[in-house]
Amino acid sequence: MVGLGLALASSVLTAQPAVQVDTSQVQGPRQLEEQTKTAAIRGYLKAWQSMGDAFLQNRADLLDGDFLGAARDKLADTIGEQTKLGFQTRYQDRAHHIQFVFYSPEGLSIELIDHVEYDVQVIDHGKPISTVPVSARYVVVLTPAEVQWKVRIMQADSEPVDHPGSEKVPAGKLTNDQTVRSKAKQGV
Amino acid sequence: MKAGLIVFLGSLLLAPVHAAKAQDEALKLPKSIKAGSAFSIKNAGGGEATLYIIGPGQVLKRDVKAGDAEYFPAKSLYNAGHYVVILAQASGTQTGSFDVTPTSTPDKLSFLANPSRLPIGVRHGISGAVYVFDAYGNLITAPTPVSFEFSSPTGAVQKDHATTNIGRAWTEMDSTSQQGRSKFEARVGEVTSERIIRQVPGDPCTLKMRAQQSGQQLQLQTDPVRDCSGNAVPDGTIVTFTETYAGGQSTVDVPLKRDIAEVKMPLHSGARFTVASGVVLGNQIGWEK
């Protein structure tokens, strides 16, 4: 029984989230190369891992490798608050449905939407309080740093009713609010 | 008996649903609030409890009396995101969740423009992407109109209008025919962000050189080198002079200095002198003793 418990604990610790990727809706004039896509996903998933470690250990420095700018600052502030209030949180991502939506023309940013399923556990002064399963839509902006893509914006809202998994995205779903543009040139 | 069994089984099946519903009803949460606005959370039951509001963007913890309404003043939660609520009591926990959404008022733009320097006359040579944020640094995901403006040194303006899609908009502009510092601006309402783009002359359009004997050498000098729009090609641009004569060839690379390039080359009878820069070939001069 104890062995089973340990095995389960171990499998939970090492569990990799299921990842589904869709690039069919990406916008922008720049082509998203396979290597870029792979590197961006690698950087993003690594960011979830380091966020989980940082929140569990209340160590903001663990964010530095994978987050930049406002995303890093906000997460670090939250960790600071947790530390003051005497609790930790465990973020365990179970599944990612990643949809690339934008690759900026100058190649300096990638925006993606991730329909992510994860568990949040609150541990107050070492005592587990509750674990809550969450399904949320994250808007994420990645930018290239020294050797990897890092998260610059990471913002969640609630899961829409229609789950846009890669096979389930209705054709033209994103066209409702696609960039509308009109161009005027004067005296050029 | 049979009917009683069905009712009993039905009760068993429905029990978790009722329990879940009871939990949902026990915590009365807003579905969503605007970032920075006040809100309250009501809960059923009695006794001491601890209320946690948890999100990667912010956390709150408060000792509460179960059964009371907890009021959170403005600016308690200002980072947009999905928040989990846990009411922990000795008897168990109640959970729920709600969203904090960005305000709709733009306050800051993140404007990525590229390149910072480019030749004149490049179609779609300049690109910019803008992300729109509210006063709390939340990405405003609701469609928001953005205008882009690229002003050349002569005052000529290119404009582009777009509406953000999930917080961002982008544009491409052509570089103009005038060299110099140009302003590239993104605007959302009264909020602007500006980048300076330096337009430099393009490749030389034509090359013409003159020759003058100087002792046993021939001095070669170009006319001022211009691009096809008449802009002076930058100093430092390499001009290559080549002398071809019976039995040999000499080549000298000279950087432009004050719009011209000049060099002295040895005179050989029957020599031919040519000048080139990049892919542009200039005139040819022959020398007969």
Image: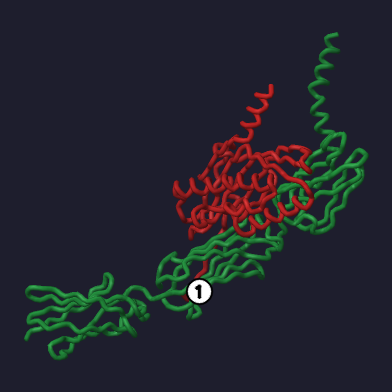
- Name the chain letter of the residue that bears numbered label 1: A
Q: Nearer the viewer, residue A172 or A2?
A: A2
Which shade is chain A?
red
Is residue B210 in sight in this rendering?
yes
| Chain identifier, colour green | B
- Farthest residue toward the front? A2
**In the image, residue B156 above or below residue A89:** below
The residue wearing badge 1 is A186
Q: Nearer the viewer, residue B190 or B264?
A: B264
Find residue B188 and report its horizontal and vertical position in percent.
63, 66
Q: Position of residue A48 (x, y in %)?
A: 61, 45
Which amino acid type is marked by label 1? Gln
Q: Which residue is depicted at the point 48% across and 76% down?
A: A187
Residue B230 shows in this picture: no
Left or right of B182? Residue B48 is right
> Image check: B240 left or right of B170?
left
Which x, y percent locates residue A176? 60, 50
Residue A78, relative to residue B221: is it above or below? above
- The image position of residue B2, as x and y in percent, is 83, 9
Give me the residue at 32% from left, 76% from top. Answer: B237
Within-10-Å neighbours for mark 1: few <14, some 14–19, many 20+: few
Say if B128 sits above or below B275 in the image. Answer: above
